[in-house]
Amino acid sequence: MNPVEEFHKLAASFPDPQPLVRTVEYIPASTTPEPYKGLLVHDLHMTVTMETYHRSPVDVHVVDRRMEGDIYSRKILLTKQGTNTVVQFGLVRFDFQYVTEAVRKEIVAEHIPLGRVLINHNVLRQVDLNAILRFTAGPGLAKYLQMPEGGVTYGRIATIFCNQKPAIDLLEISAPLEGERRMA
């Protein structure tokens, strides 16, 4: 897998008149700067990781969605619960053939973050970290993450296996962390 190509493939699922990023580059997990390394370099759900780091449950806000047969894709923002503080931008492509109808219905209802739904339904899952990426925000990402255009942040490409099947492809980008709103 070429991580930059995978990013562009996921981003192309939701075309936007404003470019999402100015630049994207693959970086080795070992060189990811803290605190992003702790947030991104692991095989856990980002929902849980973001809640722990930000000391708050998170709410999911679906910006856009598509359903084609069993393939459900969505563009999301995670915010600190009860606030407008965005902590993560994400793109998700989910093949529903690998989960129960109850899981499918709860995800399509769009009220609970994906990771929390899988945990609540005790879906046998494994998160595989595919790559860490460094982003320079274009106007799209700057708008979504409430950051300056040209600011830098980090994200990851991951795959979640549900019941030992590659069910979910993810792009998860952290909002810039305090003291980390750098310009490219």
Image (spheres, rainbow, N blue to C red):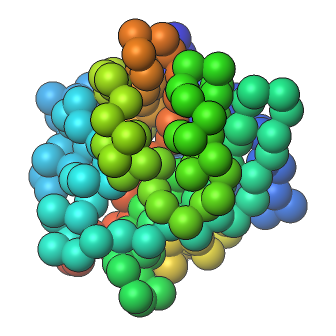
Left or right: 10, with 172 as reference point: right
Return the x and y of residue 134 as percentages of the image width and height. 40, 44
Report the residue at 50% width, 79% height from top: 146
Label count reads 0
Report the residue at 61% width, 60% height from top: 110
Return the x and y of residue 116 as percentages of the image width and height. 36, 52
Q: Is residue 25 above or below residue 126?
A: below
Task: Please identify the quarter of the rendering in which residue 131 is found.
Answer: top left
Identify the residue at the far bottom of this view.
83
Left or right: 31, with 154 as reference point: left
Q: Nearer the viewer, residue 21 or 128?
A: 128
Report the residue at 57% width, 51% height from top: 106
Return the x and y of residue 20 as percentages of the image width and height. 66, 56
Q: Is residue 5 above or below residue 154?
A: above
Report the residue at 35% width, 78% height from top: 80
Task: Please identify the quarter of the rendering in which residue 161 is found.
Answer: top left
Q: Is residue 50 above or below residue 155?
A: below
Return the x and y of residue 100 as percentages of the image width and height. 55, 29
Q: Nearer the viewer, residue 9 or 124?
A: 124
